[in-house]
Image (cartoon, rainbow, N blue to C red):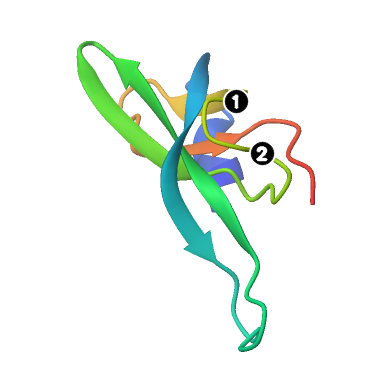
């Protein structure tokens, strides 16, 4: 759904990985997680899940977002 929403009105920016974990399901013994990212548009902060277990706090990622609704966003070139 995010891909279709971003087709016509997308912007790009850099985001920084923050200390907010997103745990992946069905891993009760050694749960894997990815960190969230945070970026600012027009003075307001937005976050998203990096979906990349190799990123650490302070890393920078490219993000695509909807110019009218930046809360709709996704990381570009994600790795897993």
Could you say which quadrant of the image residue 77 lies in?
A: top right
Q: How many marks?
A: 2
Q: Secondary structure at mark 1?
A: loop
Is residue 13 left or right of 32 when viewed as pictured? left
Number of other residues with Cα within 10 Å of mark 1, as a class: few under 14, some 14 to 19, many 20 or more: few
| Outermost residue, left side | 43
Is residue 24 left or right of 5 when viewed as pictured? right
Residue in view at x 61 percent, y 37 percent:
56
Q: Nearer the viewer, residue 30 or 16?
A: 30
Q: Nearer the viewer, residue 19 or 14?
A: 19
Q: Nearer the viewer, residue 19 or 63?
A: 19
Q: Is residue 69 visible?
A: no
> Percent x, y for residue 28?
61, 88
> Percent x, y for residue 76?
68, 30
Q: Secondary structure at mark 2?
A: loop
Which disc, if any, is residue 59? Answer: 1
| Outermost residue, right side | 80
Residue in view at x 55 percent, y 26 percent:
64
Mark-to-mark CA distance, 2 and 1: 6 Å
Q: Is residue 76 above or below residue 14?
A: below
Number of other residues with Cα within 10 Å of mark 2, as a class: few under 14, some 14 to 19, many 20 or more: some
Q: Is residue 71 above or below residue 45?
A: below
CB atoms at circles 2 and 1 under 8 Å apart?
yes
Q: Is residue 30 visible?
A: yes
Circle 2 residue: 55
Residue in view at x 42 percent, y 43 percent:
19
> Percent x, y for residue 37?
47, 35
> Percent x, y for residue 21?
47, 56
Could you say which quadrant of the image residue 25 lies in?
A: bottom right
Residue in view at x 69 percent, y 51 percent:
53
């Amino acid at each position: 759904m995010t891909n279709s929403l971003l087709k016509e009105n997308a912007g790009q920016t850099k985001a920084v990985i923050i200390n907010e974990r997103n745990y992946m399901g069905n891993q009760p013994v050694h749960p894997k997680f990815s960190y969230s990212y945070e970026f600012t548009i027009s003075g307001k902060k937005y976050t998203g899940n990096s979906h990349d277990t190799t990123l650490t706090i302070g890393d920078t990622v490219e993000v695509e977002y909807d110019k009218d609704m930046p809360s709709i966003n996704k990381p570009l070139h994600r790795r897993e």
